[in-house]
Amino acid sequence: MSGQALQVERLGVSFGGRDGPRQVVREVSFTIPPGRTVALVGGSGSGKSVTARSLVGLAGPGAAVSAARLNYGGRDLLSLSEAGWRAVRGREIGFVLQDALVSLDPLRPVGDEIVEAMRVHGWGNRVTRHQRMLDLLARVRVPEPELRARQRPGELSGGLRQRALIASALALEPGLVIADEPTTALDAGVQAQVVALLREIRSRGTSLLVISHDLGLVARLADEVVVLQDGGVVEQGPVRRILEQPSHPYTRALLGAGRRGSRAAARAQLGAPLLIADRLDKRFVGPDHQARLAVDGVSFSLQRGQTIGIVGESGSGKTTLARLALGLEQPDGGEVRLPDMLWASSTRRVPERRRRGRRREIGVIWQDPLSSFDPRWTVGRILADALTAAGLPRAAHEARVAELLRQVQLAAGLADEHPARLSGGQRQRVAIARAVASRPRIIVCDEPVSALDAQVQGQVLDLLSGLQREFGLAYLFISHDLRVIRQMSDEVMVMQRGQVVERGPTGTVFGHPAHPFTRQLLEAASLL
Amino acid sequence: MSQSLLAGRRWGDARQGRPAWLLPLVADPGAMLAACFLVWLVATAMAPALFTARDPIAIAPRAAFLPPDWAHPFGTDASGRDILARIIWGTRSSLLIGVLSTGLALGVAIVIGTFGALGGRLAERCVARLLEVLFSFPTLILSLLFAPSLGSGTRSLVLAVGIGSIAGYGRLVFGQMRSVREAGYVEAARVLGHPAWRTICVQIVPNAMRPLLVTATMGVGQTIVWASTLSFLGLGAPPPAAEWGTMLVMGRDYIAQAWWLTFFPGLFIVLTSLSTTVLGRALQRTLAAGGR
Amino acid sequence: MNAGVRTRRLASGLLGRAAGGGSVLFVSASITFIALHIMPGDPVMAMLGGPTADPSPAAIAAARHEYGLDRPLAVQYGLYLWRLLHGDLGVSFSQHMRVAAVLREQAGPTIVLTLSALAASWIVALLSVLVTTRRNRWLDGAAASVETVGASLPHFWLGIVLLWVFAFRLQWLPPAGNSLAALILPTVSLAIPLGGFIGRVTRDSFAAALDQPFVLSARTRGLSDWQVRVLHVLRHAVLPGLGLSAWAVAALLGNAVVVETIFSRRGIGRQLFEAVSMQDMPLASGIVLFVTCLYVIASLLIEMLSALIDPRLQGARR
């Protein structure tokens, strides 16, 4: 129960590799007094997750954990045997992993997962455990707990799943709860729910250790922050001080990356409309044989030099809209037009042959560039392939590939590398290079930075803005991240369940949101 | 990470300068052994006379049923023929059967699978149904049904085993094609403006075929086993051909007194099958690690 | 979802499955018909006593007429299908009994053999996988190697070796017959290769499942390694192997041909072999259809079992 303190002094974790031991965490020290919340922040590779897991003895196979002191409630954790650790896990210290969809056993009903900790530690009997499980579900505000407990994670919505996962960690009222990236990969609305839940846990006197790269979350939850880089602490202290007056350059970089301004007001004059969508509909038959409108009466007009941002949660129809705009799907209603040509229509079938000739004018950047690359090809080959499609003669390929790599700020030597060996940011740059290879006028960006680290996100977005200025490109920019949309877009369309619920210039939509859903999104992203 | 002779070790990046596919073999002792054995087999198949001086068919009644010893490492059979010599001479037809029947099955499977995956909705459904039915036919039974019509001998074995293996490869090709068809890079090609036929030839087919290489390698060993099973049942080359399966038939009746008649040919069949499996798995690991 | 939708889905699923099974049987019957009709040789001669007998032309003509072999091929095909639809499997040329009777007599031992081999292979595979996967490098590698070697062994060779070792040399088990003791060696001959194969497949999926986040979640709740394996990972790991089990049943039925021959067991495997060599069309097609039936039933059961374990598979039918 509450009243225990976690003391970590000079924690180090190393993994034995083929080339010798690799230090992943070094000299990390912090204390979590009872009832307080500490956050571990850092980019990927900073060692925050490994640190968290070594606190429950699960650093991973082949890990060597050392510390001057590792205590919980006065008990020395370093000297614990595996059986000793098992007694601590779940009972004294609870752990919540990311993304309930994969962190809960997909084949077991959620109720069983919650009851598991109780069973393993011999708490109560069948009846009392079942009752406590229902109480826990009620506490995390899951409606109809009896029904939900019998369902599997896949049958629950994202929010319910995540709450059930948290409930499973709370089963035996541990004094300390460790949450590893509790809000990543979640929709804005669900994120807000999770934050509220964590706050409530905190108010009950439970200590909390939050691992995150989301500084907004940290600001709302933590009392103290520990900033990690490459396995070592670069800065730590009370949350107010660290976030408002960061002293270390790395901390400042992290903060800077999260904070993004609005689109520069002084932007190029808009040109003629390049892509016009007129009352697009797309029907979709779900697994329950019910027909839904994935896109419902959406229209827009994309002009030269303009960025239209499309924001909404998963399932709102953003990606389907993008596919309709690209002519990859046939609309069930409405049409898509280029200035001089019908691109896609629900009434007339436009042959792919006709579109093919004009495809070089529209480029695409996806969220996961790797799956859009042929696994056998090098970067150079990928770009050359795009040039072939654009009609550039073979002889001119080499020069143009070099030029493209330069434009996206990649070293020329990378042309011989396989994308699989590049970092996420580099891959996306290759994808951007491919998209601009044919000198298009429009680029559709479908969540282009969602899978990237905060710092890298900023760099890629800057690149996209730069290219837009230089070549007068028009972007159809899709994202669920409001900050990114605010930075990149001139005009914003907010989508919910296939419909555009609000649209307008970025400043207006963000400054004075009219629709309640827009408000909800902004609030969840703490932009209101 | 399992560390075994036969499971092989996972390996990292290719070092510069050496052909990527060679490295996992060198690093993996099991695969090396398998490769060496197969190379030796191929050599034996091409020039059996180099490896043994004895005549595999000549009779020597006085030397009948000799147990294994220095003069006859694998013993002699009912007519005094040296078993090792017969095994060596039989390598050619066994390997031939394995490679040809796998090739036949693969060829037909590729045609069917490609047609089904890329030919449209109706084609897809038909092929799916056809493959499901063929698959439900135990290979042996399928081969058994067609074997008598094909006569006896190596050629009929190739056909019988080949026909029986079509379903397995067909399913693989079909499934592979279908999943590659949905791949991100196929859609990217469409967005770039490439015509469909080009994408099929340049991207879909080559990518879908990669795992087939692995399966085909392992398949050669398996078809040799099936062929010998059919021979065992009397449908292969008639005695006294020096074919591994035939040797098994001939030794069948003498199991009690002369175990070596069936043991050694069978052992070679097992070793061949094992080698192709191990090699196939090593290939699988190369492909998975991103090699070319 | 409400009960009405669920029952409707179940019904359409079953109907679809039944139609699928029916078409499988249809194609199966047709392939058998084709195969046996392109065979060289004259079934009538085989029927009337083989190459040594010398029946009169009248007897030949009479027999031909009796078995409908003088009608055009298309008509024969039609009659064949028609009779099958009515459950009439015909009369065996070589055994002069109704095919159904032959099946009744001989199918039992084969089914027993198949089921016991399937059970044995699963037991061996699961034990091996549960105990050794990822526990200890050497153990894991050794067990995986054993499985690979096992999977490469041809049934007949294994059968012969076992026969020699246990029946002739050590004389622990009978070499032939239909008793329970005589079931052991044939079962082992079939179970080792299949067990190796299932073991390899299950091992791979077991190792993959061990890396999943939900396993880590379970560990953070205080579960021991054993508990994690049995309560969580096992369910996930058996799914691919289960899917293969339908094919395995078909393969076992096919391999029974060889094993029954080696161990001189009663069974439809041996019967099939003899029927084919005697060009006994009704019996051969009857057995093949029976085997196909068993396969269809087995795949149905296995599909239901898989859906029970993983309800996500229920909706997704390929």
Image (cartoon, coloured by chain):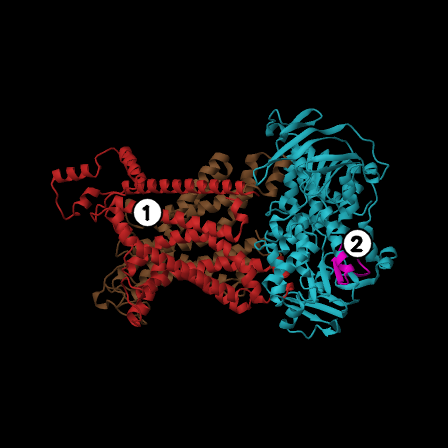
Residue B96 is left or right of residue B217, and the answer is: left
- Residue A215 got which mark? 2
Q: Give the chain letter for brown.
A: B
Residues under labels 1 and 2: Cα distance? 68 Å
A494 to A171, vertically: above or below: above
Q: Indicate the position of residue C203 as horizontal and vertical percent values.
A: 51, 60
The image quarter in which residue C177 lies: bottom left
Q: Amino acid at mark 1?
A: Val
Q: Colour of chain A?
A: cyan
The N terminus of chain B appears in which quarter of the rendering?
A: bottom right
The chain letter for the residue carrying disc 2 is A
Counting other residues with Cα less than 10 Å from the Cα at mark 2, is it few (<14), some (14-19), or many (20 or more)? many
Which residue is tagged 1?
C288
Q: Colour of chain C?
A: red
State the residue at coordinates (55%, 69%).
Answer: C136
- Judging depth in this view, the residue of C5 and C145 nearest the camera is C5
Task: Determine the secondary structure under disc 2.
Answer: helix
Q: Indicate the position of residue C277 as horizontal and vertical percent values.
A: 25, 49
- Judging depth in this view, the residue of C213 and C279 nearest the camera is C213
Q: Please say whether residue A472 is visible from this viewpoint.
A: no
Q: Amino acid at mark 2?
A: Leu
Q: Indicate the position of residue B128 as horizontal and vertical percent values.
A: 46, 41
